[in-house]
Amino acid sequence: MQTNDNRDQDERLRARMPTRTIAAEMMTTFEALKAANDARIEKIEKRQAADTLLKAKLKKIETPLDRHRSALEQARPALIRARAIPNTSRPEAQGVCS
């Protein structure tokens, strides 16, 4: 279990990570969540009850997924501002099309 200091340090590190890296980590985490949830659903269908270990595994995966989602939401305003500023170094921005 992470302490508050470790979570704060993780959040500071994520704040400096490129958005693509955060999105890639989020997708990897989501795939793990999806696999664990599929296993949970399969067990529910077989036994009509969810396994406690699978519930704990899903909870453990959901926590970093929520952190990734928050980091992307925090990065979104900066991305919107960056898109609002024209990039004149690109040929299409200068009216030159290939």
Image (cartoon, grey):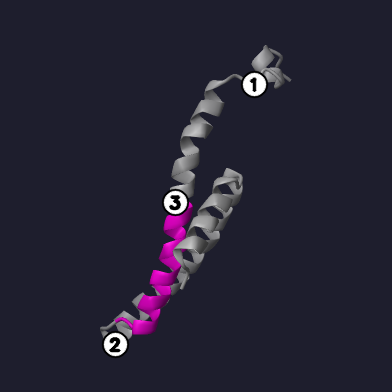
Q: Which residues are magenta?
A: 50-68
Q: N-terminal of the two: label 1 or label 3?
A: 3
Element assignment for label 2: helix
Q: Number of numbered discs present?
A: 3
Q: CA distance from mark 2 to mark 3?
A: 33 Å
Q: In front here: 30 or 38? A: 30
Residue 85 percent coordinates (x, y):
57, 20
> Is residue 67 magenta-colored?
yes
Q: CA distance from mark 1 to mark 3?
A: 27 Å
> Is residue 59 magenta-colored?
yes
Left or right, residue 43 beside residue 68: left
Residue 3 percent coordinates (x, y):
46, 67
Dot 1 crowding, Cα within 10 Å, few <14, some 14–19, many 20+ = few
Q: Quadrant of the C terminus?
A: top right
Residue at label 1?
87
Q: N-terminal of the two: label 2 or label 3?
A: 2
Residue at label 2?
47
Does 9 sit above or below residue 88? below
Q: Which numbered tag is attached to residue 11?
A: none
Q: Quadrant of residue 66?
A: bottom left
The amino acid type of the residue labelled 3 equals: Arg
Residue at label 3?
69
Furthest-top residue in this view: 95
Residue 96 percent coordinates (x, y):
71, 14
Mark 2 vs mark 1: in front: 1
Is there a contact, CB below 8 Å, between mark 2 and mark 1? no
Q: CA distance from mark 2 to mark 1?
A: 58 Å
Q: N-terminal of the two: label 2 or label 1?
A: 2
